[in-house]
Amino acid sequence: MATAATRATNSASHHPLTDSEENARLYRYESDIKTAFDAIVPTLKQVSAMQHQADFETRAQQLAREQLGYELPAEMLADAWIDQLDMRRLFAWCLFETYRRFCDEFFSDDPMGKSDVDFQRLLQECGFHTLDISPCADGRLAHVIRYVLRLPYRAVRRKSYAGALFDIEDSLEKWVETELLRFREGRPNTADEPTRYLKTVVYHYSSVDPQHEGCAAHGSDTRRAASAGLERLQAFQQAVENTYCCGASIDRLLIGLDTDTDVIRIHIPDADGAIKLDKYIDTREIYDATQPMAASIAEEWIGDYVIGANPDMADGMARFITYLVINNLSQIEYVRHHHGDHYPDIGHAERFIGAGIGFEEVQLRNLTYFAYLNTVEEAAPDLDVGIKIFSQLNIAHGLPVPVVVRYDYHGNVPGARKRAEAHCRRVADALHTRYADLTDQGLLHTLQAVRDVNAASRIEILDSSVKAQAAQEAH
Amino acid sequence: MATAATRATNSASHHPLTDSEENARLYRYESDIKTAFDAIVPTLKQVSAMQHQADFETRAQQLAREQLGYELPAEMLADAWIDQLDMRRLFAWCLFETYRRFCDEFFSDDPMGKSDVDFQRLLQECGFHTLDISPCADGRLAHVIRYVLRLPYRAVRRKSYAGALFDIEDSLEKWVETELLRFREGRPNTADEPTRYLKTVVYHYSSVDPQHEGCAAHGSDTRRAASAGLERLQAFQQAVENTYCCGASIDRLLIGLDTDTDVIRIHIPDADGAIKLDKYIDTREIYDATQPMAASIAEEWIGDYVIGANPDMADGMARFITYLVINNLSQIEYVRHHHGDHYPDIGHAERFIGAGIGFEEVQLRNLTYFAYLNTVEEAAPDLDVGIKIFSQLNIAHGLPVPVVVRYDYHGNVPGARKRAEAHCRRVADALHTRYADLTDQGLLHTLQAVRDVNAASRIEILDSSVKAQAAQEAH
């Protein structure tokens, strides 16, 4: 663990290329959100302790208002005198309420906003029209876009998969859609511009405890994780080339993330875009080497360093990698400044499982275990991993696993909303069926939510197992 | 029922525009295939009757060779003396073997072949570059492309859905893919040609028993079936228009099929493509009105009749509808000639359920109940309907429900075959789990098969619950 002394040292010595102002803003946001989620357990402990006291309801609501910022559902408190408070339900209710408030703030105040116009221009100057990133679904990578790489999240396609093993057919579909928009509507640029679709995989490893805290999907084996990501990238490229003629292809990028420090490894492609597993640059070394330099010298040094790693690399790719490296330096400083040598939570510490399609608002580390899914049937292995993680995080302490079932839809497609609603219901039902044991013990709770991405609106809560239970009891 | 007399009359009086030669060829094919499937039960009855006789195995195999054209699995016969033959397993084994032989013939001999070059040219001359047809999944519509409308099946996209309620997102995806091919590769024509994507829904009704033998998904209510199809077409058009700019749209066509006679109703679009439920032409009337005419006069009469139904209609659409009408006359004659006033099997008489994606080979009426599906979770309502139909067809007689689980894949996409295999396994498992009662009684059997559509190859059998059982018993 970092001592107060090292923390102070790191805090004192800024890197010339980091954005301290953004670091402060991002830290404030992360702290606010996590504090809100983490206030639930201590508050409910106090509420539990006072449940048989006189004037319980009034005192509990006062406490909730003070510590959580909202009131608890009156009917849950009202019945406490009969038997005792259903703390599992109350916990799930609070968690879902905190999630809703977090979402509302995200979509109305845009706390993660960053100009995507500049980025889109840079991307195209580097020879790409789309950046499509598939990180691992592990919650410790959920901040990879906005924090680790400092990218505008709206300008990047993110789709997470266990082990970063993205769905090739899904990416192919996105490639087709992207190309058509270029041909038909000249968005983001016209099809005759010689730019490419850049598909990126982010795998991960742990520098502190490499044998245990790496990627579970690859047995915490860094080389296996990297190699599987590379294989998938090659397969996607081949799929595009074999399916479409006339030089159709993509560019590929492979990045490794140390989830303890947010240092990244960027594997350097050669002139033909070929990637080697052991040919990468490490931003920790770059940070340390350039920290004493003046900003302009450091920037030049990094540019040279990237090109030096492979002089054959395409100019645009070198420029883009340099951009990512410099962005990441701010995040390295962020971690060193606030946590010292590494994060205190190097293991899993997710607050809820996010199942479905959407979750644009989740740009924070260790907040959400992602399970992008259409059906429980297809995603069963990923969900089992999620439930296993939460068995240790929550169930071991008697707390339920909170799952947000979420489907985003295009409001301009007739019937899409109705289908999203049905989708939520079907998946929530399938979850409660698959994990019936947990459901029966009140150890699995689901929230159903949809969002119209065309309207750029807030999420809408449709239903929740917490409420359903309340409704059942009322009958 | 048709009497021998009416059958003779119909047979004598040909319509001048029908293709008797093709009718004869199509009938031979249909009879051959159905005879093969329908020989299973009588043969197995005889096998069952002789199972405790001396020399049983030799005699049973001789009978099977003579009546079915293949031998039965020796190990199933060998154990008969211990207890008795497992007729359910044997039936499923024979059905799957017949299916495999039927598929092999289809993909190697191309018995349903028809030139798609001429059709593609005609389609484009009429103002369309793609014909995408969604019939109801009911087995009585499975022959709609090649028989009822006499189209080359390879040149038409068919995707069946219960109640013809096609998936709008899936069609949108196909539309995008089609447009991109036009832009990038000029296939089937270049994007600057003013042709459109023609989406067609085929709903169905029963003229003989309209209250009971219409579309189950719409309560056997013809108007409801037509109206739901029209609504879906409008929603798809709106989805394309709202999602893509610059005049993106589709053309729509609504067709009703009388599953007793294969007569069709074509709803006549006006100049703007608007369709009215009660504005349609009926090919039975056209057949009867034009039968006495000379061929050239009949053809002209039909062209005028179609235009007369709505003089505002676009020329290309009128020409295409005329083409469909004339094609359908051959099928009307086919039914009259071979079956008289209507098919003998006006109700369900499917031989197996087809679950998955593929089934290009199924171009025959009442052979297969389709359940196009990715997961059992999503398709559960459709599958329940299929199981209900087969409860009456098979289970009521002690016979199992045979389900072919099939996934076609693109062999030029790396890993696609492995994913298709996993898909088959997952869906077969989910089926046996959902209908565990039937599985336990040996009343549900599955065959797993995949096919590489890029290689235009035969299907490959991966596994079968019939074999799995045998393997288990052997251990």
Image (tube, coloured by chain):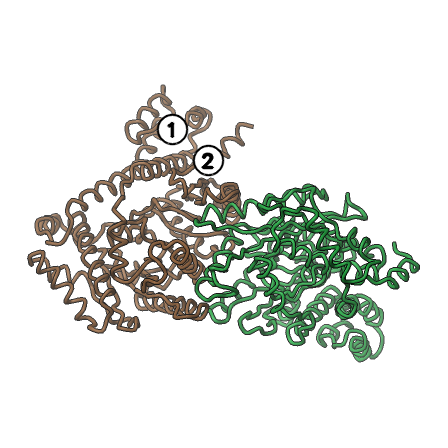
Chain colours: A green, B brown
Percent position of residue A381, x then y: 62, 48
The verdict on a common chain for dots 2 and 1 is yes
Q: Which residue is mark 1?
A: B72
| Front residue of this view, candidates A44 and A370 | A370
Identify the chain of the residue marked 1, using the numbered disc in the image.
B
Residue at 54% in and 32% down = B472
Q: Which residue is mark 2?
A: B466
Q: Residues within 10 Å of mark 1 (few under 14, many from 20)?
A: many
Task: Say whether residue B269 is left or right of residue A304.
Answer: left
Identify the chain of the residue marked 2, using the numbered disc in the image.
B
Determine whether the residue tagged by mark 1 lies in a helix, strand or loop.
Answer: loop
Find residue B161 and name its label: none
In primary-sequence order, the first of circles 2 and 1 is 1
Please state which amino acid type lies under the numbered disc 1. Answer: Leu
| Front residue of this view, candidates A273 and A49 | A273
Task: Say whether residue B38 is left or right of residue A387.
Answer: left
Please state which amino acid type lies under the numbered disc 2. Answer: Val
Picture quarter containing residue A337?
A: bottom right
Determine whether the residue tagged by mark 2 lies in a helix, strand or loop.
Answer: helix
| Front residue of this view, candidates A455 and B207 | A455
Residue A442 at least partly seen: no
Residue at 58% in and 70% down = A462
Percent position of residue A89, x then y: 71, 66
Quarter of the picture holding the C terminus of chain B: top right
Vertical comparison of B77 with A92: above or below:
above
Percent position of residue A233, x then y: 58, 47
Task: Say whether residue A336 is left or right of residue A4.
Answer: left
